Amino acid sequence: MIELIMYLTIFMLAIFVGYEIIHKIPPTLHTPLMSGTNAISGIVIVGAIIAASTDNQVVSTYLGYIAIIFASANVVGGYLVTRRMLAMFRKKDKK
Amino acid sequence: MSASILALSYLISATLFIIGLKKLTSPKTANAGNSLSALGMLIAIIATLYQQNVVDLPGILISIVIGSAIGLFFAIKVKMTQMPELVAILNSFGGIASALIAIATSITIWSHSSEFNLVIYVASFFGILIGLVTFSGSVLAFLKLHNYHFSKSITYPLQKYLNIILLLVIISSFFVYIYYPEFFITYISLITILSLLLGINLVLPIGGADMPVVIALMNSYSGLAAAATGFILGNSVLIIAGSLVGASGLILTQIMCRAMNRNFIQILFGSMEVDTTEQENIADIYKDNIISSSADEIAMILSAAKNVIMVPGYGMATAQAQHVCADLAVDLKEMGCDVKYAIHPVAGRMPGHMNVLLAEADVPYTDMYAMDEINHEFSQTDVVIVIGANDVVNPVARETSNSPIAGMPILNVDKAKTVVIIKRSLSPGFAGIPNPLFVNDNSIMLFDDAKKAIINIIKAIREG
């Protein structure tokens, strides 16, 4: 029970931190924000690795592998496309 | 000891994610922020692979390579106009990954018949529900964005009730399962199917222009699903990263809703109701009152203008007209004219869509203005060029109270001295209502594809 409360505390605090930071992000960067957060939600890759490793249950392991594929596509696709977009914004900065 | 190292690595990752987002508050630091965030991800992955008792490292690495190749392919291939589709697809990936983890963990626990742990049960339930709703909803959103024929809102009687019924059945099956754990397989199959259906049914009624709201919402859900897997696995970095994404999507959803003057529930439960009798009057309203013009005439007006504001909409994206818009702006600036871009929060198909397209066309971000920053300037503006936008400049929103878009904040383009509207036809926008702006005395219509029209205007300016 105490663990649950601890996790809930982390959850609440992270929501507030996220809220405070993100609402300062200007509308110009809202699309990169979305693709960037897509990449961050790829953090489930950590969970997928754990799911694919913890058990000798074949089904769970395979589900874990599939989850790894999706999550790593999220991570790589998200960060790279965000980078591509932000490079377009930065380029004008130098002129 | 090794557990502490893992926890510490996760703490570093979470901190890097937060700093990375913080740096997104300015275009100058945004790229560095993105790299920091990626570094955080790398640390989390390596620490997990290193510390976790990985049974089959090659299998995991192969999966990572396959996934990365898919991600790489998307990131390189996608056109800037297709960004909403890409985000929809990535949302669906995040959702399905979380759901699969939740299902896999549930199966593991079930097969070991470990002791009853309510936290894990509840968290798995939410992980599967939210993850799969995100998945099927986002896939449908992708199809709607990708194929114009799907993009219309699809409604049928009692649609909203079906959502409530689905949700109630899903929740009650969870309670049944708690008391009768032996029905595990039935339970998992049932909530899997029903959650997928719920996602589809939620997105079916959403029309093209409500897409920004749905994409932002699915973005939020994919984060919440990740947070749910964090509760299942007792993993702090998953909870923190998931909550950050959840909060981000939630804020964007709010901004989009405010920009359309609609509440969230309205968008989720049923589409905009269009009064069809009003539609029949469109032809009457427009008849004989439209001033249609040529590229040459518009070039003349622009040559005399001291300041110009461009208002891009989804039409600019479909016509791929962002580059020629930027060319026109450069030409006008060379003639000593001040050019700005006014961007409505819901212009396009996702938050910030127009900004990215303009950035692609080398428009400096300092020339792009949000609605609140620029609305007061229209009354001192010589010429406004509306490129493929309709409802976001419809003065009806300000004036009549019984219109579907009443109260929606709009760009007050009608206050400018001259309004040039480039549009393919008089067809209404997503709200399905006529736009009295088109018949104003200071409005000039140019009926053409946005790209062709602007190329012609540029040609006329250069010749003239």
Image (cartoon, coloured by chain):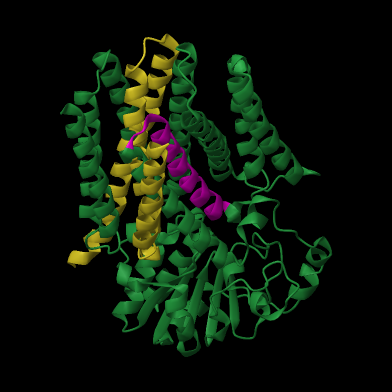
Chain colours: A yellow, B green
Residue that sits furthest to the right in the current view: B277
Is residue B58 one of those drawn in magenta? no
Q: Position of residue A10 (x, y in %)?
A: 36, 47
| Residue B346, visible in the rendered structure | no
Q: Up-down: is B58 above or below B336?
A: above
In x, y percent, where is residue B86? Answer: 43, 42
* Quarter of the figure that contains the C terminus of chain A: bottom left
Residue A94 in which image quadrant:
bottom left
Q: Residue at x 33, y 35 (%)?
A: B235
Report the residue at 32% width, 67% height from top.
Answer: B365
| Count of marks, rendered view | 0
What range of the chain is rendered magenta? B211-235
* Nearest to the observer: residue B198 or residue B444: B198
The residue drawn where x is 69% and y is 50% is B269
Residue B24 is situated, as x and y percent measured from the top left of the image, at 29, 58
Quadrant of the image occupied by residue B52? top left
> From the viewer's perspective, is B446 left or right of B123?
right
Which residue corresponds to the image point at 40% horizontal and 54% vertical from the top-left? A31
Q: Nearer the viewer, residue B348 or B419?
A: B348
Q: Is residue B286 left or right of residue B104?
A: right
Residue B171 lies, with reference to residue B103, above or below; the image says: below
Residue B312 seen in render: yes
Quadrant containing the N terminus of chain A is top left
> Looking at this view, is B55 or A3 the one in front?
A3
The quarter holding residue A3 reads: top left
- For the stretch drawn in magenta, the main secondary structure is helix
Q: Residue furthest bottom?
A: B380
Q: Position of residue A64 (x, y in %)?
A: 39, 21
